[in-house]
Amino acid sequence: MGSCRTCPRAPFPPPLRTTNNSAMTKQHKLPELLAPAGSPEALRAAIEGGADAVYFGGSAFNARMRAQNFSGEAMAESIDLCHRYGLKAYVTLNTLCTDRELLPLLQSAAEALNAGTDALIVADLGAAATIHRYFPEAELHASTQASGHSVGAARELSKLGFTRMVLAREVDAKNMRRFVAESGLETEVFIHGALCVSHSGQCLFSSLVGGRSGNRGECAQPCRLPDARGKYPLSLKDLSLARHIPALIDMGVCSLKIEGRLKSPEYVRDVTRIFRTLLDEGRGATDGEMRRLAAIFSRGGFTDGYFTKQIDRSMMGVRSEQDKADSAGQAPFTGITRRIPIEMRFTMWADAPISLTVTADGKTATVLGDIPQAARTAPMDKAAVERCLAKLGGTPYRLRALDATVGEGLMVPVSRLNALRRAALDALLPEKHTVTAPTVLALQAEGVRAAAPTARFQQVSQITPKARSYFEHLYLPLDRYDPAVDGVVLPPVILDDEVEGVRQQLQKAVAAGAKHALVGNLGHLALAREAGLIPHGDFRLNVTNTATLQTLLSLGFADALLSPELTLPQIRDIHGATDAIVYGRVPLMVLEKCAGLEVGTCRTCAEDKNQLVDRRGEKFPVLRLPPHRSLILNSRPTVMSDKKEELQRAGLPGGHFLFTLESPREVDAVISAYRKGTPLSGAVRRI
């Protein structure tokens, strides 16, 4: 069972809470309540609201680069403040990085670890493996950007040093319960906040269309924009599982996460406070509490559709003027009002160092000072000592009791008493361990670039004789496999209750002659290997650096396609068994919800005839993924047929081709253009 090894000690209220909800037959350790902090003020608001832990980003490599974030001394001070209040502090390093950024990311990890962070939240697999290699004691949490949605993913991630996985928001209650029981990792789930319409880590819309990568913390949120009709087919309501707290407790989920690093301190305080109450009382939210949450922030209400498997149009929503008006009445956050009770015991005797023992929140520390001197004029009395030690202004503590024993005729400078008090308070903090990042990082992966082109097709009818002769390997989607090809493309999402069906499909494909599999998620690797297929990493694995490539190879992949977000110079930097997409409409989003129904009908969806049209008239085809998922393609195909020299310089002699909506005649025209080095007509995208 993926239970918590440790949960934070928070004085407000205590950590080992149990629920007495009459609907529950067992007592459970309550999950950690994890709140967002996009600024130091928001962090203080999370403390005020009753969080058990907070997560925040540094100055780089975090998925909310528009937040104020933390760095250097501010990070260390904020982590210390969390620890004084009994909270854990997690630092996010959850963006993808290139080869040239891997060393700076490692240095950012060292900065966070030296500041005392309790864990690093990481998305890039190569970055995680490198951090684990240099800092093996660092606790690693797999970000939702790592696209983990299954027990299989957890098992592979554990090999890389991860101890916790943030489960995809799209996972329903049944699969979530199974994951907690079988994954072997701590389970963290989002319970409230903004909901991306695409599976996290699988959205390239902002990047390939707008030049701002969501995988690098710069998402421009194109999904929140109206389409050509003035409608919002991709804008989801905010998630809220406030009514499902008892079920989450009963599952044994380790951490309940509130989204909102771009939200105000008032939002953080008030949302955290409501969930604190629900957790402590072991119950779901009332209608009144749901209205309070909506008044803080909503987009026409909330959705729990993924959790309950009620995936329909009721999930869609936009932020109205009424929503904004409802949110205007929040009381301003003015600081932390909570104070931690502290007890002190002081002794001062002749010929012995002065001693101060402090106890707060179950932690005790003792520090020794100078040996007191014989007083020449006015000896120090008990009242003077107490006045000095009771000065706790600017700290989170309030004095509950002070026992001072002072020998006669002795004195120590007041400055030494002040220093003793400060040292005692600092001694209550966890011990910090210093790590040192390397100054040079040698990156090398096994293997060489693919020399021959490969291709995937949407339908077997697209595969022409010219395609058979030009491509070394041909792939079809698993549910459309045909013996005419030697490879299958695994679905981008396979929830745990879908695994057996996929396993049976793979067995049939292998029996019909399949030899290769394009695998786009770590959780699917074992499925391909146990079927006897050669696993090739698909572009969905987000390979943007050599370390990630080598990590995948070490797990058992034969090679991997590079991320479509890379430029040609960045591709050239990566050495090893790779290839890259050189033609086709790159998928921009993987949706758990059927997007086709927002713009068409079930019939047009089944025929792959639906499309989204944006405000500029760009048309984005929508393809159906079984059972009811959707794939949104780029409006413009990537075309490099007339850039053969550039491809050669980048080390791409072959290349991978994506054929989705092309007719057989168009397939042949593409192949001819790449053979001759001539351009293709129409609006295109370049690498």
Image (cartoon, rainbow, N blue to C red):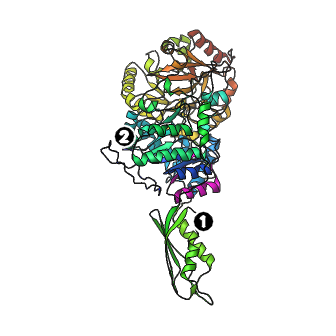
The location of residue 74, given as percent across then percent down, is 63, 55
Q: Could you say whether the residue bearing mark 2 is in a helix, strand or loop?
A: helix
Who's the residue at 54% across and 67% down the image?
Answer: 425
Residue with the mark numbered 1 = 393
- Quadrant in the picture for residue 215: top right
Residue depicted at 56% across the width and 21% down the height: 658
Q: Which residue is mark 2?
A: 182
Residues 525 and 4: in front is 4
Residue 303 place in picture, x, y as percent: 49, 32
Where does the C terminus fall, quadrant-wise?
top right
Chain part drawn in magenta:
68-96
Foreground of the two, 249 or 214: 249
The residue carrying pointer 1 sits among few (fewer than 14), some (14 to 19) or many (20 or more) residues within 10 Å by Cα, namely few
Residue 433 appearing in the image: yes
x and y percent of residue 95 in the render?
A: 59, 40
Q: Quadrant of residue 152?
A: top left
- Label whose residue precedes the other's in the sequence (2 or 1): 2
Which residue type carries mark 2?
Answer: Glu
Left or right: 510 with respect to 327?
left
The spot of residue 577 in percent (x, y) is 55, 33
Residue 455, numbered label = none
Q: Nearer the viewer, residue 293 or 479?
A: 293
